[in-house]
Image (tube, grey):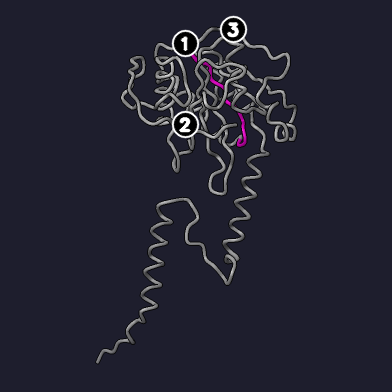
Amino acid sequence: MRTTGPPPEASDLQAAAVGDMWTALRAATSARVGLTRVGHSLSTSDVLDLRQAHARARDAVHTPLDVTALLHELADLQPLRLHSAAKDRPTYLRRPDLGRRLAPGSLLPHTGSDVVFVLADGLSAAATMVHAPAVLRATIDALPGWSIGPVVIAEQARVALGDDVAAATGAAAVVVLIGERPGLTATDSLGAYITHGPRADSTDAERNCVSNIRPPDGLAHREAASQISRLLVRARALGRSGVSLKNDEDVAVGAPSDSGVSPLAGRPR
């Protein structure tokens, strides 16, 4: 005769249901959910995981941009190498204002182009190395008929350095592809900052941002390029970028319209 064990207790069934819920949530996000608690603290494994994530974020901030590799990868675009007024990484981190300006004596050709692109290290050089070249090429492909200024690779740079580059080249717009601030989940997230009619005193309210570019967990390269190109086209049609510029999914490149949806938001730098 076959026998069975005692029926499961209600508490066991409840624990199993909760466990299944956390498993489903973890499969849907890279965020830390349902962390294990031991008494009034987290479990040892979770604490060690958080410390490791923090160390990776710190490493991302301090890892230098491999400019030689970028110059080689983008050789067909004849990129130019420039540096901000921040002479080194410690200065860059202490003096954000210096990262927003080109080093004295920087030279750029005056091309009067429709748009100029800047690939900047920002706070995550890894993001720029991994994602910026593909986003750059896809965006250029998405802008047929546009004149493209010199591609600039900038070290110790922040977003506003693109304004100096645009002023020097006479570009009507600038796109800065820059490594975003690392977090405990992502250390290689790229941001694209678009400014139409950039000036030395342009504010963050005059920029648009496409952020969290980091496939497969974030925005894909071609989708990011599509959004960037649409914003550029819309900005040219309106004569401005920033909070009044919408990311209109109905706008075709080269054929702007005057309708829109909600603007993209970005972190000021």
Residue at the outermost left position: 1
Query: Mark 3 belongs to which amino acid?
Result: His
Which residue in the structure is indicated by mark 2?
Answer: 210
Q: Please, what secondary structure does the residue beneath circle 2 have? A: strand
Quadrant for residue 179, please give it.
top right
Query: Mark 2 belongs to which amino acid?
Result: Val
Query: Residue 31, how many percent across, how many down?
Result: 48, 52
> Considering the image in quadrants, where does the C terminus appear?
top right
Which residue in the structure is indicated by mark 1?
Answer: 147
Query: Residue 226, how many percent across, how many down?
Result: 39, 26
Using the image, tell me which numbered label, if any, was put on residue 110: 3
Left or right of residue 197: residue 71:
right
Q: Please, what secondary structure does the residue beneath circle 3 have? A: loop
C-alpha span from label 1 to label 2: 22 Å
Asked whether disc 2 touches disc 3, contact meaning CB atoms under 8 Å apart, the reply is no
**Magenta segment:** 115-124
C-alpha span from label 2 to label 3: 27 Å
Query: Mark 1 belongs to which amino acid?
Result: Ser
Quadrant for residue 103, please give it.
top right
Asked whether disc 1 touches disc 2, contact meaning CB atoms under 8 Å apart, the reply is no
Please check the rendered image and state whether residue 169 is part of the magenta-colored stretch, yes or no: no
Q: Residue at x 65, y 25 (%)?
A: 100
C-alpha span from label 1 to label 3: 13 Å
Q: Please, what secondary structure does the residue beneath circle 1 have? A: loop
